[in-house]
Image (cartoon, helix red, strand yellow):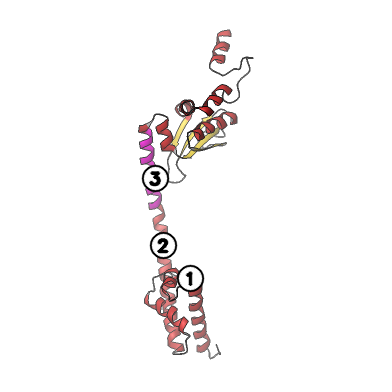
Amino acid sequence: MSDADDLARRIGLLDPRGRPVVGMPAALVSAACASDEIAAAALRGAVLSAGHLRVTSVRPPALEMRCPGPASALAVAGFARRLSAIAEARQGSEIDGAADYVRVRYGVGVLLEQLGAPGAATRWVDAKAVAAAKSRLDTRPLSQANSARASQAGQHIAEKVRLALDILGSDVPPEWICAAQLRIAHPDASNTELAERCIPPMTKHTFAGRLRRLISAAEQRALDIPA
C-alpha cells in the first residue's frame, strides 16, 4: 500500500499530505500558464486520454475532452486558451452523460498542429468541409420551396396590379405607376430587388406600400366608393 501511495504522489494524484488532488497539480498549471510547450504537452495528454472529435451536419464541429471534475475542466480549458484556441468548460456532455468536459469549437485545426498531430488536423479540416457542404445541401430544398412561394406571391400581386391599372386608367399617381410597372415587368423578383430599381431607390416597405395603396384604390373604384 505504501508503494501505491508513493506512486500516486509521484504522478500527482495525491498531495504531499496524502490527500487526493482536486483538478490539475498546481505546479503544472503554473508552468503551463508561462510556457506554450508545457501547455501543449498537458493538453496533448488530455486529448490522447479522453479526447473526442465531433463532426456532424447537425451540431457545430468541436473537439471535446472529458475531465474528472470541474477544476480539471477549467485547467484544460486554460491550456487550450494558452494556445489561442477558443475553449469552454461545461457539464452534461452527450459523449458521457453528465461528465465535466472541455469543448473547443474554433481553432481546432491549428490546435491539433500544435499538439503534434498534423494528420488529424488535415482530416479535421476535410471532415469539417464535408459536413458544411452536407448542411448546405440539407437546407437547399427549404430554400427552393421558399423561393417558389415568393415567386408565386409576386406573380399574384403582378396580376392584381395589372387589373388595378386597367380600372384606374390615367387616375394613378406617378409614384404608384413606377412601382406597378416594375412589378408587372418582373413578377418573380422580390420587393427588395424592385425597390432598388426605382428612381430614386426606396425601401422594400415603401415599394410594397405603394402597390397596396394602388390595389386598394382600384377596389374602391370598382365598388364606386370614392378613393
- 34 on left or right of 178: right
Q: Amino acid at mark 2?
A: Ala
Q: Mark 1 and mark 2 in contact (Cβ < 8 Å)?
A: no
Residue at position x 57%, y 32% in the image: 74
Residue reaching furthest front?
Answer: 34
Taking 140 as reference, is 98 above or below it? Answer: above
Front one among 84 and 9: 84
Label 1 secondary element? helix
Residue 70's disc number: none
Front one among 27 and 163: 27
Counting other residues with Cα less than 10 Å from the Cα at mark 1, is it few (<14), some (14-19), or many (20 or more)? some
Q: Which residue is mark 3?
A: 131
Front one among 117 and 145: 117
Q: Mark 3 and mark 1 in contact (Cβ < 8 Å)?
A: no
Counting other residues with Cα less than 10 Å from the Cα at mark 3, is it few (<14), some (14-19), or many (20 or more)? some
Q: Which residue is mark 2?
A: 145
Residue at position x 45%, y 71% in the image: 191
Residue at position x 45%, y 88% in the image: 167
Taking 205 as reference, is 108 above or below it? Answer: above
Q: CA distance from mark 2 to mark 1?
A: 21 Å
Taking 207 as reference, is 127 above or below it? Answer: above
Q: CA distance from mark 2 to mark 3?
A: 22 Å
Q: State the quadrant of the C terminus.
A: bottom right
Label 3 secondary element? helix
**For marks 2 and 3 on the same chain, the one whose residue lies earlier in the sequence:** 3
Q: Amino acid at mark 1?
A: Lys
Residue 204's disc number: 1
Magenta stretch?
Answer: 120-136
**For marks 1 and 3 on the same chain, the one whose residue lies earlier in the sequence:** 3
Q: Amino acid at mark 3?
A: Ala
